[in-house]
Amino acid sequence: MSDQPETPVGAAEVARFRERHGLDGPGGLIDVHTHFMPERVLAKVWEYFDAAGPLTGMAWPITYREEEGQRLARLREFGVRSFTSMLYPHKAGMAEWLNGWAADFARRTPGCLHTSTFFPEPGVDRYVREAVEAGTRVFKAHVQVGAYDPNDELLEPVWGLLAEAGVPVVMHCGSGPAPGKHTGPEPVARLLARHPRLPVIVAHMGMPEYTDFLDLAERYGEVRLDTTMAFTDFTEGFSPFPRAELSRLAGLGDRILLGTDFPNIPYPYVHQLEALERLGLGSAWLRAVCHGNGARLFGLDGTP
């Protein structure tokens, strides 16, 4: 099978979006929420979506159900120059193995920000420190799938380490698309009260608790939010973003980051970008969200 996609889905439309908003520079788009993981693990994730499992609860077709080389080629066609390999364990004993895979993936994949993960288990502080020392740029914490409290005492040294090292963690902590045992703003608020300098990127804008997570971002200067699936027609159907909060979204424009959930999205990639565009917050805001904020956070060159 070729590593090049035969018919890029929406590549021309993405190119027109970049041209409209001055995002055609060498830095391109920076997507902080893309999923690459071992093939057998990804296959299990896709099976879960196909079955409309309880953490999704709805039909969820995968638009980019392709082999790894094709998915990477898609991102390059879209002008995504920096991206992540978001992966996460659902039980103890997985995280360290996943981190080994992700380190190798980052080494062999230009543009991939070395991504790691963790789970509340004995030894977590050791392997997180080893990942940081090995050059991890970002972590993924999935409170919903992992069904753990971010305030678990086993994670306390991890949060302190990440706050001290300044390594951000993308955290799925909102209660969408379905609530988990420890999702919602309250556990994160307790965590940040102890670690106010912890660089948290709230996945999916914290849906559906958008307002509460905007509150946390206004209270803590190292809290950011990613746009993953927010504002799209798909998500607006069950978890609409409150339009009364658009002014706050504009005011936090230096701490909103482009995220998409590629490849596990039920629509073309361009739709996420057009959903941001139709918010009407302007080209400067879009340039910051789609490139500038990520470039500053990760020390990348080519900020337009």
Image: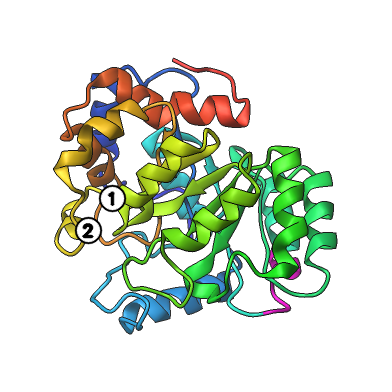
Q: Quick check: 230 above or below 42?
A: above
Instruction: Categorize mark 2 by other alpha carbons within 10 Å: few (<14), some (14-19), many (20+).
Output: some
Quarter residue 278 falls in: top left
Q: Measuring from the top left, give residue 280's x and y in whole percent.
A: 16, 28
Going from the N terminus, do you reach mark 1 or mark 2 first? 1
Residue 235's tag is 2
Q: Measuring from the top left, give residue 122's x and y in whole percent.
A: 81, 74
Label count reads 2
Say which amino acid is labelled 1.
Answer: Ala
Q: Measuring from the top left, give residue 303's x and y in whole percent.
A: 49, 17
Q: Is residue 226 visible?
A: no
Residue range of the region highlighted in magenta in the rendering: 92-98
The residue identified by callout 1 is: 230
Q: Residue 134 in magenta?
A: no
Residue 134's tag is none
**Whether label 1 touches label 2, CB < 8 Å:** yes
Helix, strand or loop status at disc 2 = helix
Quarter residue 14 falls in: top left
Q: Nearer the viewer, residue 36 or 2?
A: 36
Q: CA distance from mark 1 to mark 2?
A: 6 Å
